Amino acid sequence: ASRIWEVLSTKPPENGVPLKLQGWVRSIRSQKEVLFLHLNDGSCLANLQVVGTPDMGNSDLSFGSAVLVEGRLFPSSHPGQDVELHADRLEVLGPCNAKEFPFKAKKRHTMEYTRQFPHLRARTNSFAALLRIRSQATSAIHKFFQDQGYIEVHTPVISSNDCEGAGELFQVEPASSTVLRELSEASGKETKHFFDVPAFLTVSGQLQLEVMASALSRVYVFGPTFRAEKSLGRRHLSEFYMVEAELAFTQQQEDVMEVIERMVKQPTEQILASCPEDLHLFYKFVSPGHREIVEKILTSRFIRMTYTEAIETLRNHSENFQFKPEWGRDLQKEHERHLVRHCGGVPVFVTDFPRDLKPFYARDNDDDKTVAAFDLLVPEVGELFGGSLREERLETLQDRLDRLGLSNSYQWYLDLRRYGSVPHGGFGMGFERYLQCILGVPHIRDVIPFPRFPHSCRM
Ligand code: 4AD
Ligand code: MG
């Protein structure tokens, strides 16, 4: 059987070609002598028109049912379609109770509504389009790195460190206590943890990427990360995909920011070129006007401002905020939104954060107050990237880890500074937030197939 995206680009001869097709019924129109069906198989947004006879429409044929059609593909004289399938045989493979099915023919459901049916929502045009765009975006990002000789590293999902130091970890243990008991009996000694140390789902692959960057120079990872954050907000998930890269021999924040700017623009351009119909659906129905916002991102040089400048800017508009901006405090969502608006919708790097606001690995600046760490703020989501230069000086890092009481567990990390240390830096981008940003989707739960958030893990 063929798939519709291929069939639509073929040019059948006037006398037709044999074709077998399978898909789900998107609409049915029965007239005295003819039956018209629209079929979709998820391979593209477009449906294929099937022309049959009314006797083919037995009682099992309805909106949502799965069918197999055998017939001949002809050029079509109908406007808006180049081909149509004339059915000789139609078989209902899986009937669908259209009355109870949550989605209705030719109706545009809201994302809030479809979100209630994570097991069925891929049958809607908008979520299927999202999934195709997500897939294209994944490959565009891989292509970006591969084309420049970055080496993909599979960093572990299970890790013993809290890279971000925020304590937002999910702990990993065998599911049943019997497993643990058996383990300790087998080894003849008391086993406290499965891995002998507490183990967690990773919050970031950064530290392991640093290991690899100190041998392979330029590396990246694109994989799932986990945060036990309590947040139920529109840009937080418990499980999300992160794109992280690490660059050895990097002296300036600017070097890392240049890479980020290209990493936003190049894949986005590729996605615009590779899925025009799916994107059109978003820009027309889901987020009208968002295309211009994306154009601006693609055509502007991103703005750079220091954290200290950002606080000054915000303080000049203090009356707008619930949380008063103050040097030394983290930027709030409302502050991020204001800064992007202040920059005319152009993404803005906020650099050189106060040391206390960033994790232990960030490199000290000379002012003894700030570190070479930055965030990239964008329209729709606020913080899209976090990045920094990493502290590569053994003594400075050793001091900091001592003060945090972490030296013991980070000896391996200090080794990287003992044996051929180099200035280096890197970044991480939340992939779902990226999709929100290019598609204009307000809620992060609408850009991931199976969203995980507090109190939600149904399947
Ligand atoms: O700012 P974060 O915490 O930075 C890091 O984890 C660094 N170790 C990355 C690095 O330098 N290699 O997270 C990076 C990005 C954020 O800017 C945000 O886009 C996204 O990951 N992110 C989330 N996305 C969805 N849900 C959450 N709970 C997220 N937390 C962070
Ligand atoms: Mg961050």
Image (cartoon, rainbow, N blue to C red):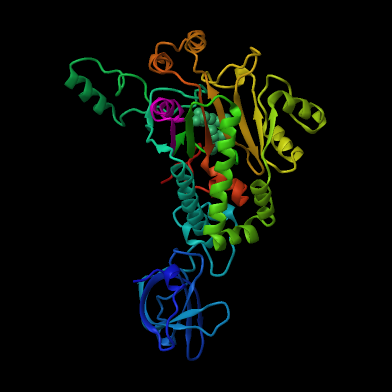
Against 86, residue 383 (above or below) is above
Location of residue 254 with respect to 61 vertically, above or below: above
Would residue 219 be counted in the magenta stretch? yes
Is the residue 39 above or below the residue 204 in the image?
A: below
Visible residue check, residue 132? yes
In the rendered image, the residue lying farthest to the bottom is 33
Q: Where residue 161 appears, x then y in whole percent?
A: 42, 22
Q: Quadrant of residue 328?
A: top right
40 left or right, relative to 296: left
- Magenta range is 201-222
- Residue situated in front as seen by the camera: 252 or 31: 252
Q: Where does residue 6 sit, x and y in percent of width and height?
A: 42, 69
Q: Is residue 378 left or right of residue 39?
A: right
Magenta region includes residue 414: no
Residue 97, visible in the rendered structure: no
Q: Residue at x 46, y 52 (%)?
A: 135
Figure label count: 0
Q: Which residue is at a point 73% across and 21% down the rendered structure image?
A: 326
Residue 434 position in % (x across, y down):
56, 44
In the image, is 140 to the left or to the right of 329? left
Q: Residue placed at 48% from the left, 34% from the top?
A: 245
Quarter of the figure with residue 219: top left
Locate residue 302, reporting x and y percent.
Answer: 67, 39
From the image, which quarter does the N terminus lie in? Answer: bottom left
Q: Quadrant of residue 416?
A: top left
Residue at 74% x, 36% y: name it: 338
Is residue 121 positioned above or below 203 on the image? below
